Amino acid sequence: MESQPQPQPQPRRPRGFAATAAAAAASVSPTGTPSGSAGAPTASSGKGKREREKEKERTKLRERHRRAITSRMLAGLRQYGNFPLPARADMNDVLAALAREAGWTVEPDGTTYRHSPPPKHQQHLGAFPVRSGESPLTATSLKNCSVKATLDCQQPVVRIDDSLSPASLDSVVIAERDTRSEKYPSTSPINSVECLEADQLIQDVHSTEHDNDFTGTQYVPVYVKLSTGFINNFCQLADPDGVRQELSHMNSLNVDGVIVDCWWGIVECWNPQKYVWSGYRELFNYIREFKMKIQVVMAFHEYGRTDSADVLISLPNWILEIGKENQDIFFTDREGRRTTEFLSWGINKERVLNGRTGVEVYFDFMRSFRTEFDDLFAEGLISAVEIGLGPSGELRYPSFSERMGWRYPGIGEFQCYDKYLQQHLQRAAKLRGHSFWARGPDNAGHYNSRPHETGFFCERGDYDSYYGRFFLHWYAQALMDHADNVLSLANLAFEETKIIVKIPAVYWWYKTSSHAAELTAGYYNPTNQDGYSPVFEVLKKHSVTVKFVCYGLQICSYENDEAFADPEGLSWQVLNSVWDRGLKVAGENTLSCYDKEGCLRIIETAKPRNDPDRRHFSFFVYQQPSPLVQGVICLPDLDYFIKCMHGDITGDLVP
């Protein structure tokens, strides 16, 4: 029987680099010369060229598609916290983090072993258990929560470090979905982990016994901020009896010390380099009688320019007089409107303040304070100095000023349109080789715009273009240069005294790709960029203590939150970034009142009990809008709060 000829398999069509090589080989004659060199180009050479061009375009499209998918994956994963991976993590770092999370010990040389079997509540999760919380604010308050029933319906979640670039995500292996999750199909990867959200787990905060037992925990000193208004605009102590009464009340609560704002607009109000400290001297003498520590704030900003403010403290009058002739000493928005909250750091090295630069003015004020109260430094009464580096004493631009009409949750506006900052921008653009980039974005909206309403901050907007990245980097660098310059002189003025810097909590729009409110405030922190690490590297250079605002029980609705706010996610990023650099961290509450759940949340953020490194705040600042003697205490029981911070009380909060 004659065998039937077998069909020959069709040769596989080469793709990518193989297609390019094949086309190049086809265009060369057997003698080694190009087939079309002896005469007119052949049809095959033209066809090969067209094929190469088409393949290049297909490759570009595939790469763009891959990057788009990677970007969306990164944006989604950022919402649920991260493993503590280094900035440029490789596969070994990812595997080691997963192994440690599963309870294994991983040595630096890769040796991996387990000391003991995993806890029972983790065994049902397989090799990759999900952490019980998504940030310090949730993880600490949700310790020992009963989450088994919730997690049974979920896929394992792999944590990716915020600083990983989209390209580096290609090497990350995503764990396969747990078979149990097939019973609970979801419509999107984001929705598939909804039941892990903090607002659904918070109801289990008190599910275990002794959850509120802080006996034996780390001692966190508590300072109370003295009410603004005791020192009038003539630097006189306005209400000595009220001061004594408030200090007496603080002393009865076993407060460790007080915070005192030393206002530049009061002390150097009328004439340059004429400092009046008399009211502060009298105030400090009262505090000395009660034997409490003092932290002073070098307040170079304006206070009280709102409708609800009962006290108004402006910048020094002689500064305002200069501003009438040269308005560019103040921050300016795109429409040319000026804000007098703080001097533009465009003049930090410009001699426009009666022959002095901005940093020289700050240094002279700090040096005058250090000389005037040398005796208090010598006896240790003044324990630390906080340097005001921007509006409200925070290191940021005045991008969301209520005087300009801003209302939460507006994205704010860039504040770089005074002539001095514009000159800096022109030099930076020229140095980059693109002089036409010496401008602010013209499609960034207004103070109360939403990101999706602008061409700059919207999804895949201009913030991630070549120009956008250049501008935002320059804008953030100007902020860091300001901090670097002023802190260098602060360390010179105060020598060995502890220096504190306050970092803002710009948490609205944190769950969007651009993080628009952070960008206008000066923090280049979109989803594909870590904007806080370079700031903390500058602060590490000066060995400062970072003070960060803590939000109590302010968990927004993840379904109905129009601002895409995430105060917990922001706190998680900031606190871990600071701690990873070995800097000390302090906390401060907002002016809004807290219930007992908020009180517990603040305490556990200050000293997380499940942190293996036993990291905790170096101190906590309690502030409220009214004097304590008026009986308006926002925390349900300030005495209990202080005892919990000191680690010497047990039991539940007093109702």
Image (cartoon, grey):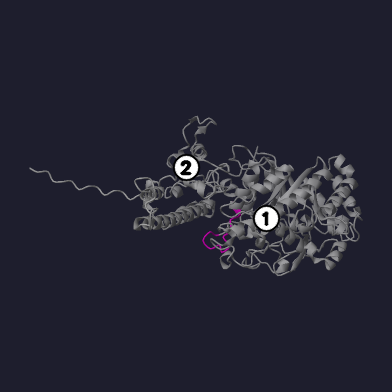
**Residue 35 horizontal/vertical position (percent):** 37, 52
**Residue 67 horizontal/vertical position (percent):** 48, 53
Q: Secondary structure at mark 1?
A: helix
**Residue 377 horizontal/vertical position (percent):** 85, 42
- Does residue 385 belong to the magenta stretch? no
Q: Residue 289 occupies which quadrant of the picture? A: top right
Q: Are marks 2 and 1 in contact (CB under 8 Å)?
A: no
Q: Is residue 600 visible?
A: no
Q: Secondary structure at mark 2?
A: loop
**Residue 111 horizontal/vertical position (percent):** 50, 29
Q: Report the span colored magenta.
A: 557-568
Query: Which image quarter is the N terminus in?
Result: top left
Disc 2 target residue: 129
Kind of residue indicated by mark 2: Pro
Horizontal relation, residue 544 to residue 580: left or right: right
Mark 2 or 1, nearer chain start: 2
Marks 2/1: CA–CA distance:
41 Å
| Residue closest to the eye, 14 or 159 | 14
Q: Residue 56 occupies which quadrant of the picture? A: bottom left
Kind of residue indicated by mark 1: Trp
Horizontal relation, residue 172 to residue 414: left or right: left
Which label was assigned to residue 474? 1
| Residue closest to the eye, 620 or 467 | 467
In the picture shown, does residue 373 fall above or below 624? above
Which residue is located at x 47 percent, y 52 percent? 193
Which residue is located at x 16 percent, y 46 percent? 5
How many marks the image carries: the answer is 2
- Does residue 560 belong to the magenta stretch? yes
Which residue is located at x 63 percent, y 56 percent? 470
